[in-house]
Structures are given as structure tokens and as C-alpha cells.
Image (cartoon, grey):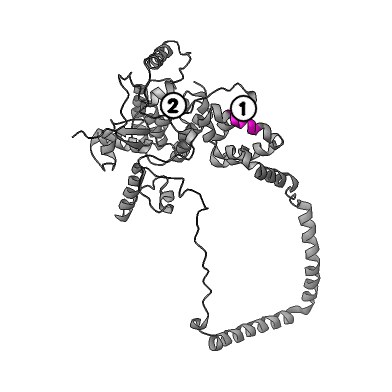
Amino acid sequence: MTATDPRAQWAELLPIPADAPPDAAVAQFLRTLPGADFVPPMERIAAVNVLAGAALPTTPDETVERMLRAEVEAFAERYWELPPAERLTTWVELSGRGTPTTRLRELEPGLDVPVTRLVDPVAEELAGVFRTLFVLPPRERAIRRNTWLLEHAADAGRWSSALAVVQRDSAPLVALEPNLRTALSAHFARTRTAFVEGATTAPLKSPPTYTDRVTRAAHSYEPQRASNEGWKGGGVLGSGALIVLFIGIRLIAALGSSSNSPSRSNVPDPPRLNFPAYTSPKGAPASIRTFTIAEVAEFQRYEREKDEGRNPQVPWAYASWVLAGRPAGTLERANPWAASAKPSHNQTFTAAEVAACERYEREKAKRGNVEQPQAYASWVLAGRPEVSSRPEQPNGLTFSFDSALILACQKYDQTMTGSKPDDYEFWVKAGKPSRPGDYTLPTDQN
């Protein structure tokens, strides 16, 4: 274990060795309860949850949240070093521990994107830029993207050619960073040139130095000091006269405003400004963002609980749904980048592919360093299916399950208590899946 290993950091809070078994973590946690008056700190509860797989309730704690955020960022740093299957496993494990959901959702689209090494060195370098930008938070990503475009503007044609190679051989990777793809595309060349010229020919003015500010302040002080010298010569009599004059002016103004000022009803209302309603450009789609049935059900549940006076958590993408006019859910979420479509969970595999994937898992458990088959990630995401005697007939409806909905259904399925998720029946009908994705619901046979 290294000093930066997340498990070692959690182990220090109990404290126990980083490689201690789960039972040792639970025993150490129980031993420390009397010393804490049976009210352990939140970071210690979170530590035993991580090290022993417990599910003790916790409340927000600054130390715990900081450590959870650090774990997510550590996962982002080694994101592309992990095979897609391990990447998905780590992501699901972090999602179940209350880690920052917004940051994890940003990393979700690339979970099943493999790292494809390209022969062209320029295209391989550009693919590395796409990978680096994707795992950054939004603000850092925008800064890094614009900096890179500015530094490589002189070779725009070279990078546009490399983009075509990456798009051809690794289209799902390109779809993860659409802004960079647009900036390097051929039809964006004129806008890119204007961006570079504006960034290089109009530098920001340097801020004034401390000496300049002191000099300006000294010059402005000279007339004021001269007037103050004359004021001192007037003595107390001059100051008293000014005070009396000031009070008199205030009294006269108050009397005039109380007797002659017009009433509020006579003041004309400001003119109303009528702005034209926004219309989409001609030929543009009505909305790129669509919402699944599960998402719409979650939004409607949130509004019902809010109307009942409860304080539910705002679902992700709720504001976008409201701005879109609260549309009905679709069976599948529209994908504006068709090239980045995820592999279907109805995908079938040949006997050779299934045998290669199973052999890879057996040899990996023994030796560890085994070359991964090309179809392994899709096979894992499909639930490790066996060889089918005949292809599955696509006669059912497709339903999309995200990680939040799956976790809610699993918790309800274990206890059968509490609020039943609106889409629980669809989840059961789909075979109680444990991985996010699109699943075909079997049709009822009459």
C-alpha cells in the first residue's frame, strides 16, 4: 500500500493496518465506541463502511466529503489505465458510498470506451488529448482545451487530418469531447482563425503597479490639502455657520417635499418591454436532450413529494426537463452522436468469443498479466451471457436503467419497505439488472 492509497487513508482513521481484513475493521470500530461515549465521529463511521463494506448511516461531514472527493479524483487520474470492466466496477462501488454524484455522472459516459492504440503517432497524440480532457472537471477542461487550441493553432490542418483518423478508429472516444471535435473540424476553420487572432493580437493591458497608484493618490491629495489649510483659518465660527446653513436647507427641502410633491399615483409607470419569443434556427431539431421514462417518473415523484410538503432531493437534469416543457419520457434516450452509441445489451456473442472471454478471466485470476479479448468489455456489460442457440428476437420494448434507479430498486427489493420506486416493476421484468444501460423487456404471451 502506498501513502496515497485511498484504503490506507481510511485505515488511518480507525486506526488499523491498511491490509487488515474487514472483521478487524469492525472489531476496532467497536472497541473505540466506549471512548467516544458511543457517539463515534462521522469519519470513523465512513471508514468502517469503506473497509468492512458496512452500511452504517452517516451525516454530511467535511472530512468525509473531502476524502470521498479525493477518491473520485484518484479514480479519474487512473481512469484510462483501467480496463472497461474494472472501470465500471470501481464506478459502481464509488456510487454506492455517497461520493459526489455530479462528478461521477461526468465520468459515466466513458466507462465502456476502450483504449485503442493508433498507429499514426499524430492521431495517437490527439487521442491522448481527448482522454486527458474528458477526465477533467468542466472548468479545468475548458481552460485546458482552449490553451491547447491556442498552442497548436499553427498546425490546424495537421490536427484536422489526425481527427479524421481518430474519428475512424476510435469514434466513441471522440464523442466524449464534442467541443474539441468541433473546434478541429473543417467547417470551423474560419472561427478558429478568428479565435487565435483575437487571443494573440489583443493582449490584456498590464495592471497598474503599486508605485503608479501611490503617485496618483499623492497628486489628488494636493488640492485637497490646500483647501484644508484655508478651512483651518476660518476657525470655529466658519464651521458653525456651515452647520446651521446645512440644517436650514434640509428643513426647507423636507417642507417642500411634504406639501408640493406629487402623489405616487401620478407617477407614470415605466414602459413595458416586449421581447420576441425565442425560436429555434430553421432546420434545427426541437431538442437534442430527451428524457427516459425512468427519468420522467423520477421528476414527477420529486414534484409530488414537494407538493406534499416534504423536502426531497432535486433529481439530476430536473431543471433541463422543466425548461423543455416537462416532456413525456421516451423508451430510449436520443443520442446526438450516433458514432458513440453504447453496445446493445441484446448483443449476441459467438462460441469463440465467449470461450475467449471465459479463458481470459480464468488466466487472469491465476497469472494476472493476460491480454484482454476485444469483445470482453461488451461481454461483461451484457451480463456475461452464454452462447445462444438462436439470436434473440427483438420483440420487446427497450427500457433504460441508470445507476441511481438500479440502486433504488435493489434496496427496495431487499427489504420491501419504504417508498416503492415507480419503475420497480419494469426493473423486475427486465431481470433485475445490476448494470446501467438499455434492456429489452419481454412481451406478455397471451
Q: Residues within 10 Å of mark 1 (few under 14, many from 20)?
A: many
Q: Are marks 1 and 2 in contact (CB under 8 Å)?
A: no
Residue at the bottom extreme, as displayed: 259
Residue identified by numbered label 2: 11
Residue at the front extreme, as displayed: 283
Q: Residue 257: where, in percent of width, then height?
A: 56, 85
Q: Residue visible at 62% across and 23% down?
A: 120
Instruction: Tell me which segment is drawn in magenta.
Output: 159-165
Compared to 164, does 320 lie above or below? Answer: below
Q: Residue 323: where, in percent of width, then height?
A: 43, 53
Residue identified by numbered label 1: 123
Q: Residue visible at 47% across and 23% down?
A: 83
Q: Looking at the image, is mark 1 or mark 2 earlier in the sequence?
A: 2
Specify whether residue 427 is in view: yes
Looking at the figure, which quarter contains the C terminus? top left
Q: Residue 80: where, in percent of width, then height?
A: 52, 26
Relative placement, left or right, of 235 versus 412 is: right
Q: Nearer the viewer, mark 1 or mark 2?
A: 1
Is residue 337 shown in magenta? no
Q: Secondary structure at mark 2?
A: helix
Q: Dominant secondary structure of the magenta stretch? A: helix
Relative placement, left or right, of 13 versus 116 is: left
Q: Residue visible at 28% across and 37% down?
A: 426
Q: Residues within 10 Å of mark 2 (few under 14, many from 20)?
A: many
Residue at the left extreme, as displayed: 446
* CA–CA distance in space, label 1 to label 2: 43 Å
